[in-house]
Every structure is written in structure tokens, then in C-alpha cells.
Image (tube, grey):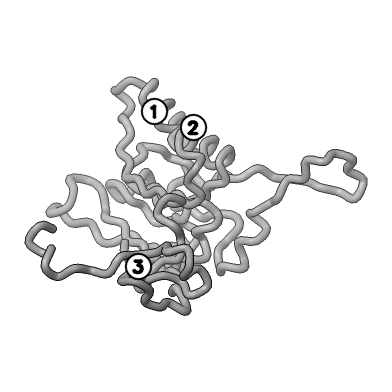
Amino acid sequence: MYNDQMSDIEPTDSLTSQMRTPDHHQDRKRHRRISSTPNPHTNHESILLTGDFNSRTAANLDFYEITNTNHDTSDNFNIDFSNNLHKFNMSRIRNSCDKTKNHFGNLLLEMCRNNNLFILNGRVDGDKEGLFTCRQSSVVDYFICTYNLLSCVVNMSVLDFSALFSDVHSPLNCKLVFNSIDNIVECDDILINDLACHERKGFKKWDCEKKPNF
């Protein structure tokens, strides 16, 4: 996974996590704790999860079907993010070569639905088919992200299996491209947005003399 340009997403707003959930012979309570991973990090607007979840989800929905009508009297209007997936050239309904769903898959889908997380497998360019990721017989390795990161996703692909990387899993690759920060100026040795120069916010210039310390 890599990005081509500087991100304009604040580091404090983002969370990237590599997952490895227990298999069927380990304590399922651990998986329940993992299934609520985003909850302790609600201050992070951008979340990207990747790894082996041991969760088979088939092509089941990772979002809630929401029906809002003109006759609704509730003040709580639910946004159906899934209806906007086509804007990113992504399929609303995922594809998957794995037609089986297990208990951990149900937990993963529940986590996605409750936290506006979307599975990239079988949905984005590079893996529209939802290719197998393990033993050429199941999909248990995923890239999953929040809605606001979908516009940064260029493609995701399942690479050919190699015993150099794993015993049974195929490596996954995801390419993200972030928007460049425009109108960057130098102000008192700090690179910041010129609209907020007086606030002295932004990134410090790299000090070559500190290279040995780094």
C-alpha cells in the first residue's frame, strides 16, 4: 500500500491498522473485541484496516439498507453512503468467489455496518471479482476503510501466491492517491497553508543535520 502525493488528511484524524484475528480453534471472545476495533477510535475520521480476518463474508451486504421517504417525521435522517459508491467507480454490491459465510464473517459484516466501513474486495478496480485470498478456496484477507477514504482508493488487487510471503495466503495490494496540499508557503521555517500562516500550523522543514538521529 502506498500513496503518490502528500495527504491533506490530518494524522490525528486517521487510523491504519493491520489485523490478524484468531482462527476457529482460538478464543472467539478475542474476535468479538476486535470486531469493535473502530469504537475506541471514534476520534479518527479515516480508518483503514487490512490483514487476515479469518472471516468469510461471501457477498453479503456490509451496509444497512436504508429507506427514507418524504413522509418521515423523524429528525434522525440516515445517510445511505452505499448509494454513492458509483461515484468512485465501485460496485454497491460486492462480488466474491467465496460463496461461504462463517461466524467470524457475520461479526465482520456487523462491524462494517455499524461503523460505515466498506470492504474493498470484490468492489474496486483490480479485484472486481472478489478473488480468493487463501488456499485458492476462500476470501479471508481484506482491505476495509471508512467512506471518506473511498475517494482515495485507486485500485486493490490480490497478487499471486508466493511461499516467500505466507504459507497459504496471497498478498494483497492497495493503491491510494491523496489530494495535494495547495498553496503551501514557507513561514518562519514552517511549511503551512498560506490561509493559516498566522496560526503557525503545519509541517516542520526537514533538518538534514538530524538525519543520523532519525
Q: Quadrant of the N terminus?
A: bottom left
Q: Nearer the viewer, residue 92 or 210?
A: 210
Is residue 39 in sight in this rendering?
yes
Left or right: 206 with respect to 112? left
Compared with 187, 41 (above or below) is: above
Mark drawn on residue 3: 3
**Which quadrant would residue 156 be assigned to in this image?**
bottom left
Q: Which residue is mark 2?
A: 107
Q: Residues within 10 Å of mark 1 (few under 14, many from 20)?
A: many
Residue 126 in view (yes/no): no
Residue farthest left in this picture: 212
Q: CA distance from mark 1 to mark 3?
A: 30 Å
Determine whether 2 is above or below 117 in the image.
below
Going from the N terminus, do you reach mark 1 or mark 2 first? 1
Res. 44 mark: none
Numbered marks: total = 3
**Residue 17 point in image, percent of width and height:** 35, 45
Q: Which amino acid is tagged 1?
A: His
Q: Determine whether the residue tagged by mark 2 lies in a helix, strand or loop.
A: helix
At label 3, the amino acid type is: Asn
> Which residue position is annotated with label 1?
31
Residue 59 position in % (x across, y down): 53, 48
Discs 1, 3 touching: Cβ within 8 Å: no
Look at 61% across and 68% down and name the residue there.
87
Q: Amino acid at mark 2?
A: Leu
Compare residues 186 and 113 and report the one nearer the observer: 186
- Whether tag 1 and tag 2 are in contact, CB under 8 A, the answer is yes
- Secondary structure under badge 1? helix
Residue 71 lies in quadrant: top right
Disc 1 and disc 2: Cα gap in Å? 8 Å
Residue at figure coordinates x 42%, y 77% from the top left = 184
Graded by Cα atoms within 10 Å as few (under 14), some (14 to 19) or many (20 or more), the crowding at tag 2 reads some
